[in-house]
Image (cartoon, helix red, strand yellow):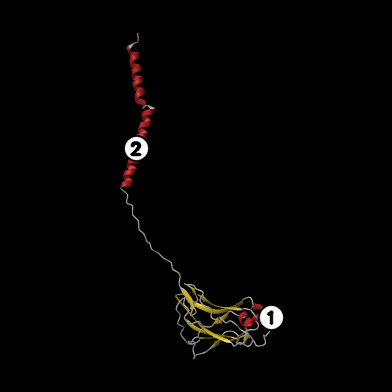
Amino acid sequence: MRSTGQHTRRRGRAAHTVRRGASPQAKLGLIALCLVLMGMVGTMGSWAAWSVSDSNSSNTFSTNTILLDDNQGGQGGSATSTGTALFNVTNLEPGSAATTECIGVDFSGTATVSSLTLTATLGGSGLSTLEGQFTMNTATLNTSGTVTVTPGSNTNSGSCTNYPSSGTNTSVGTQGATLQSWASTSPYTVSSPVTNTCYKFTVSGLPSADSSCSTYCNQTITLTLQWTLTTT
């Protein structure tokens, strides 16, 4: 028979054991509850925060403009088109007369122009045969007149009617040089380029000495005139 003192001591130890700490499951539950409560506090804090923004939109960057065109319908820069040839001479024969044509060149836009040049290029199947036979009798420019240009339209057809009768004619290259020599020494700089410039070109016909049909018949030579603007 157990004594009353032994029973009392065991009950005391059992009670002491319970008081010393909760079970592991209880501890885990307590931790989970704390995490939930912390999450609720964080969520409540985010609900209370402001969210604002400031926008600076529609910032743009634009380039300047430049349009170089002529009254034969050619243009380059902000718009481009080939235009109509200044010379279209056919059926030449020994002793043919020279041909004179004129063209007006105009430029406009917001860019500042630093130089204007004219380049001449020869081509065609009869290049080697004819380039030394034709002569650039006249190649001049005159800035005294005003060129009327409708962009992309041929309003001149090579006419020299509007070429200035006054003012100063400035030579472009060597006058009276063979077409080969005149073209090869380009590009030519147009001094102090102005908005409107008129040009006159006179190219000789086939020389009378070129009477050998086996050499000069059925030959074609082409001439390309190109103006180039350079901006600062």
Q: Which mark is residue 180?
A: none
Residue receiving disc 2: 36
Q: Amino acid at mark 1?
A: Ser
Front-lying residue, 119 or 28: 119
| Residue appearing at x 32%, y 40% in the figure | 40
| Residue appearing at x 33%, y 21% in the figure | 15
Q: Amino acid at mark 2?
A: Val
Residue receiving disc 1: 214
Say whether residue 66 is visible: yes
| Residue appearing at x 39%, y 28% in the figure | 24
Left/right of residue 136 with respect to residue 82 in the rendered view: right
Q: Secondary structure at mark 1?
A: helix
Q: Earlier in the sequence, mark 1 or mark 2?
A: 2
Front-lying residue, 76 or 32: 76
> How far, Cα to Cα, is label 1 from label 2?
107 Å
Left/right of residue 65 with respect to residue 11 in the rendered view: right
Give the image location of residue 27, x and y in percent.
Answer: 37, 30
Front-lying residue, 209 or 194: 209
Give the image location of residue 4, x and y in percent.
Answer: 32, 12
Give the image location of residue 77, x and y in percent.
Answer: 49, 73
Nearer to us: label 1 or label 2:
1
Q: Quadrant of residue 189?
A: bottom right
Crowding near the residue tagged with mark 2, few <14, some 14–19, many ≥20 C-alpha atoms within 10 Å: few
Left/right of residue 190 with respect to residue 149 in the rendered view: right
Q: Quadrant of residue 7?
A: top left
